[in-house]
Image: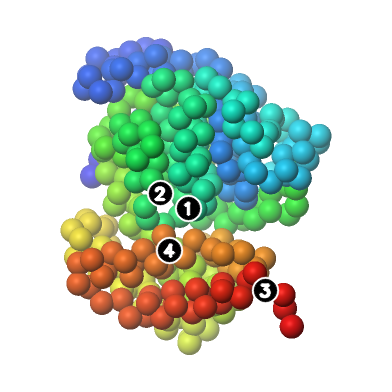
Amino acid sequence: MHIGHSRGSGLKFAENLINTVPARSRSLAAFVTEADQKMKIGIIGVGAMGSVYAGLLADVGRHDVWAIDTWKEHVDAINAKGLRVEGASGDRTVKIKATTDAAQVKDCDLVIIATKYDGVTPAAKAALAMAKPDAPILTIQNGLGSADKVAAVVGSKRIMIGVVGGFGASMKGPGHAHHNGMEFLRLGEMDGGMTPRLEQVAEIWRSGSFKVLTFDDIHKMIWEKLICNTTYSGPCALTGLKVGEVQANPDAWKVAAACATEAFNVARAKGIKLDFDDPVAYVKAFGQKIPGARPSMLLDHLARRPAEVDNINGAICREGAAIGVPTPVNNVVVALLRGRESGFGKARS
């Protein structure tokens, strides 16, 4: 696996890269050579994580950042008072444009899809209309399957995939997001390979103080993150415990560790080349970086909202069943999560 760490700057770097890459990437040369110019960035889905992205990218002061979300109160608050993002990166309030109507946003140089799994398909349709003809569309979600949904709408060659870790963001209220971690953002082309536009998109994120790595095989990163999500998302949502509390509770940890082991077994059976051999040690080390975090699945259940069950723990069950790898613990976790969610639309007695 190749990891790109180079940070070449300006037009000379971009032009040198353009001459060494396949025609598929050369068609995007116009995007790459705008390295030092103002970029128009549309972010679809500015919940907790999307707000962190928007706030830090806008704080650079160079880019025209648009926030698109269905939460009207949040959009109104951003337009009236700005977007406040506080936490691991500091505390700032930035002025950006926000709307509930994606049709108001056109000619974006980069579109970022940061919705939850169930909002990916409509977001992809909106992104296609928002973006310039060859502009990349970057999709960042938890779990498995989101990029395939976007590809069904826009085609895989325009798609980049982002995998984040260690952020743990939450909403404090309309126009106000908090994040209690700031680890790496991993980026890669859906079709694989290292391209000039991939490095250029990485530089945009780095300018917003994100730590970014680029990969020629982002799908391995998706699975490594999925194993971590599987470990904590379902168990935290069912128990109400934070990540560190799950680790400290022997019964909860037994379930979480089993979820991780099953996910690892499925990945290996699918031929995914993971960088570790001990899944329990890997997910424990991951969780120790964010002990106070509440996974988004837990936050959804606390708010009595359906969570991303199908593309996290449910994805392990689905992928395991397809290749004959048993996932009994994840099966039970998913059944309990769905049973719990069945009562969310009903009034509490």
Residue 15: mark: none
SS category of the residue bearing label 1:
helix
Q: Name which residue type carries label 4.
A: Asp
Q: Is residue 320 above or below residue 124?
A: below
> Pointer 4: what residue?
310
Residue type highlighted by circle 1: Tyr
Q: Residue 176, percent across and down?
A: 73, 47
Q: Quadrant of the C terminus?
A: bottom right
> How far across and down, in percent of the image, does residue 223 sit?
33, 57
Q: 214 left or right of 107? A: left
Q: Are marks 3 and 4 in contact (CB under 8 Å)?
A: no
Q: Which residue is mark 3?
A: 346
Would you name the residue on which mark 1 appears? 117
* Dot 4 and dot 1 residues touching (CB under 8 Å): yes
Sequence-earlier tag: 4 or 1: 1
Q: Which mark sits nearer the N-terminus, 3 or 4?
A: 4
Left or right of residue 186, residue 122 in this image? right
Q: Which one is closest to the eye, mark 3 or mark 1? A: 3
Q: Toward which corner of the image does residue 298 lie, by quadrant?
A: bottom right
Contact, CB < 8 Å: mark 2 with mark 1?
Answer: yes
**Which scheme is used to colour this image of the protein?**
rainbow
Picture quadrant where residue 214 is located: top left
Mark 3, residues whose alpha carbon is within 10 Å: few (<14), some, or many (≥20)? few
Which residue is the site of mark 2? 146
Alpha carbon separation for disc pair 3 and 1: 23 Å
Q: What amino acid is found at the position of numbered circle 2 in the picture? A: Ser
Q: Nearer the viewer, mark 3 or mark 4?
A: 3
